[in-house]
Image: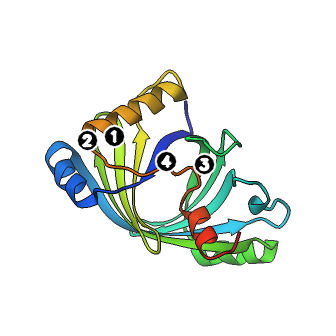
Amino acid sequence: MENIEIELKFPLLNTEELVKKLKLTSKFEKESNEKDYYYNLPHRNFLEKKPISEWLRIRESKKGFSLNYKNWHNKEGNCVSCDEFETKIDDINSLKRIFKNLGIKDLIVVDKTRKTWSYKNTLIAIDNVKELGNFIEVEAKGNFSSIEEAKKYLFKILEEIGAKIGEQDFKGYPWRLLEKKNLI
């Protein structure tokens, strides 16, 4: 399942407790600060579809800049997988000028601190998102025969690590921020 990302995201209710447990049971990968700049196209308004099923984003991190496009598989709003394409950007200012000249508009900026661990064929990310709070994302990294098999495995991992979670987030951080700011 190349270029397909399978992940689950939830508000996290026991952040401190879970971080302590992950430090003991998992391999710490990294801590990063990421700013994600989301854009909308003039010829295909991503905000018209409810829920939004496509995103175009520039990510700014310590590693540099990248351009990312996601297209979610299930357009009904309860999807955990998408086609994802990403590439590094050498000259962010030129890309932003290209976007401006093409009429590609800024939508929202998601600013977060992310701590990531590897655990049994998953990546576990705990995000602190400005204006939204703490979330957990678990992403399948093993070989799975289907999306459903990977999804079951991810729920098992959440239970195994003792994550206390809220209702599953199918909308994502940009949608939540747009909603919070009454922009959609």
Percent position (x, y) of residue 6?
A: 50, 39
- Residue 89 in the image: above or below residue 80: below
**Which element is circle 4 on?**
loop
Based on the displayed image, in which of its 4 quarters is residue 94 positioned? Answer: bottom right
Neighbour tally class for label 2: few under 14, some 14-19, many 20 plus, Cα within 10 Å: some
Q: Earlier in the sequence, mark 4 or mark 3?
A: 3
Callouts 1 and 2 close, C-beta under 8 Å: yes
Callouts 3 and 2 close, C-beta under 8 Å: no
Query: Which residue appears at 25% of the width and 41% of the height?
Result: 161
Question: Mark 3 sits on what residue?
Answer: 85
Question: Mark 2 sits on what residue?
Answer: 161
Based on the displayed image, in which of its 4 quarters is residue 78 positioned? Answer: top right
Question: Mark 1 sits on what residue?
Answer: 158
**Amino acid type indicated by mark 1:** Leu
Q: Nearer the viewer, residue 47 or 31?
A: 47
Neighbour tally class for label 4: few under 14, some 14-19, many 20 plus, Cα within 10 Å: few
Q: What whole-number distance in Å separates the C-alpha atoms at marks 3 and 2?
A: 30 Å
Callouts 4 and 2 close, C-beta under 8 Å: no
**Amino acid type indicated by mark 2:** Ile
**Amino acid type indicated by mark 4:** Gln
Q: How is the image coloured?
A: rainbow
Q: What whole-number distance in Å separates the C-alpha atoms at marks 4 and 2?
A: 17 Å
**Which element is circle 3 on?**
strand
Q: Earlier in the sequence, mark 1 or mark 3?
A: 3
Q: What whole-number distance in Å separates the C-alpha atoms at marks 4 and 1?
A: 12 Å
In the rendered structure, find residue 168 and report the number of the disc placed on it: 4
Callouts 4 and 1 close, C-beta under 8 Å: no
Query: Which residue appears at 30% of the width and 47% of the height?
Result: 163
Q: What whole-number distance in Å separates the C-alpha atoms at marks 1 and 3?
A: 26 Å
**Which element is circle 2 on?**
helix
Q: Earlier in the sequence, mark 4 or mark 2?
A: 2
